[in-house]
Amino acid sequence: MTMQPEKIGIYEIKSELGRGGMATVYRGYDSRFEREVAVKVLPQELMHSDPQFRLRFEREAKIIAQLEHSAIVPVYDVGESDGQPFFVMRYMNGGSLSERIKAGIFTIDEAIQILDAVAPALDEAHAKGIVHRDIKPSNILFDKRGNPYISDFGIAKLSQAQAGNVTGSAIIGTPAYMAPEQAQGMEVDGRSDIYALGIILFEMLTGKQPFEADTPMAVAIKHITDPVPHIRNTNPKLPEGMETIIQKAMAKNRNDRFSSAVEMTNALREVARNVTTRLQAVPAPPVVAPASEPTIRSEVKALPSRKGFNPLFVIAPVLVLAALAGGFFLFNGNRTPPTTQTPVSTSTSAPENTDTPTSISDASAVPIVIASTNTEAAPLPTETLTQTPLPSVPVSGGADQIAFVRSNEIWMMNVDGSELTQLTSDSGTKTDLQWLPDGDTLIFISGLTVKSYNVKTGVLDIVTDFPSASSLNAFRVSHDGKQVMIAVNNEIFVVSFDLETMKGVSKKSDLIALEHCILPEGKTKSALIVKEARWAADDKLVAWLFKGPTGTDLVSVLDIQDCTPATIDILDTFPGNRFDAPGFQGGVMLDFDWDGSNQFIFHTARRNNGWGELHVYNWETHRPTLTVNPIGRRCCYRDARWSPDGSYLLFSFQDEGLAEAAQTLLYYVPFGDISAGANLTPLPLPEGFFINPREAPQPALRPAQ
């Protein structure tokens, strides 16, 4: 039994996370940045048996460093310790997609939520000529908020080169997710990853892999020779359009597959909306009862024509090479990432113009406009400004517009639900939405990056990013726009705020160099691990959501006017011993809001990843105002927001009694109507507008302009 090392390089090793044929992964601690990390150690044989390996290792590490995307697990460091090469990555503590698939079959909407995040990341890598080669559920990991990330870019290319020295050839990947060209040892490109993504989609929607056999070799052969199984034979409840998507994603000929992961995701979204996908050129095959060992034959386009092709010409050499390698044949059941090459253009049709106005089909729906997200502002056509005068924007509660998240994109509408408009189309995760005082700029967190969107110019820009951080939980600007609270790397900073200055900030030392009020200091209130933050209306007090010493989430109201960590005064903390909040038995609070005066509102986490009972609390009287649950006293709610003047409440609602049929509805109503028990009407969004019932809308109300 191999003993666990105490340190690898400068990293203290806490425990072993996993072990596979090509690497061992440990949970480590980086004392320099005070963060947990994952340390992946490659076998010593790679360094000793190939004198050129170190040079390749350094070259590939530089290529990996090019991958900067909010849905790719970042590599912090690479090195060598006692003759063993290692990678240091962000520690992901939310489990893997493999574990979630084992827990139950996904709905199409849940699958879209996953692909919406990882597809743009995969396309980003392909655009840089980097092919993963081992896309599979165990290489899609989740953070503590449930956001998915692609892991293990960077090791397969190194492993491939080493295997070539042993056998003269190598096949890298996991047989269950291996494209036909990959299983044959042919050159691969981004479309091989698309094939694997199709398999993952099949598995999410059925709980089974499309090809199963007694040995990994037999599975690989099926990818080469067997037709793609019909997904509706395994899960007859799926719509017919799913057949077309799976058949195209897993086409034997790579030229017949989707040209990008985002194209595949968009096709899936069309099926979810019950729209006949434009890919569907032939009727879907009939659904048959699944057999114990189904062998389903269908018309599938063959591999590129080669006279007298016989699979044995591929299979036999592979078997011989495997035997010669003494078991080093790199069919990997655990790890194996990318290869780099010139990007391959596979587009077979012109890309969709995302700036073209589109609307969701609904007889009573408000028109929906897709707004431009170009990084350079495009001037508005003159006629748009001169044809007709702009109608007045309705104002309620001191707000005129609402921004919110739907399917990882930001949408905006008037407070009465009119003029529903999509602002972004990059598919990246988005949290912590906030309007800046200018009323034109919306800021939000995307992974470890803070971005801004200007609603006048349509410019999407980066405010700042923290590439070496393990977490970025909050970025909250004061009402006067002069300060910002940043919860990064499990530390809280209160520093001066300026958009241009902030673009030069990327690490702790940059924050310290700014004019500041509060910097983290051990054994003071500034050492709290803050998850969310809010300012009082006069910016003199703050409220922090953090995990208390017993593991229960708490909110504290603090006086930080002295700008000295040692003298921070806690004025109140709740729920704690103040009151027993129904539904708060688990002690989890994912979100809260403050009217800037004396009232707080928060929700518990009962179902669907954070929907629960709604509570209002007065911190000055130290008592709950009421357990709201305003819609017929029924659960469940989330992401409630006070209006700028504190007279209205905006909240999301799902009727727990309708189970899976429950839709996500948005309400914006006078708080007095809630107290009086009045009948409330939701904002007029299109039927079924929110696709994923587990998604958090995270709205932000814009003060009236």
Image (tube, rainbow, N blue to C red):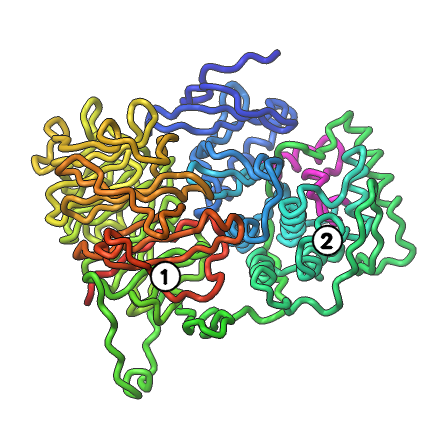
Instruction: Mark 2: give few (<14), some (14-19) or many (20+) Cα within 10 Å.
Output: many
Q: Are marks 1 and 2 in contact (CB under 8 Å)?
A: no
Q: Which residue is mark 2?
A: 232
Q: Report the residue at 60% width, 58% height from top.
A: 268
In the rendered image, which residue does mark 1 sit on?
A: 682
Q: What residue type is disc 1 on?
A: Pro
Q: Earlier in the sequence, mark 1 or mark 2?
A: 2
Instruction: Name the residue at 61% across, 39% down.
Output: 104
Element under label 2?
A: helix
Question: Image check: 235 left or right of 227?
Answer: left
Q: Position of residue 198 (x, y in %)?
A: 65, 51
Q: Quadrant of residue 400?
A: bottom left
Decide which of 220, 541 is in the foreground and name it: 541
Q: Which quadrant of the view contains residue 54?
A: top right
Amino acid bearing label 2: Arg
Task: Please tell me which residue is depicted at 84% across the width and 47% down the height of the picture.
Answer: 295
**Residue 239 drawn above or below residue 142:** below
Crowdedness of circle 1 by 10 Å Cα count: few (<14), some, many (20+)?
A: some
Q: Is residue 87 left or right of residue 161?
A: left
Q: Secondary structure at mark 1?
A: loop
Residue 705 % position (x, y): 19, 67
Q: Is residue 684 visible?
A: yes
Span colored in magenta:
154-183
Q: Residue furthest right?
A: 308
For discs 1 and 2, the disc positioned in front in the rendered view: 1
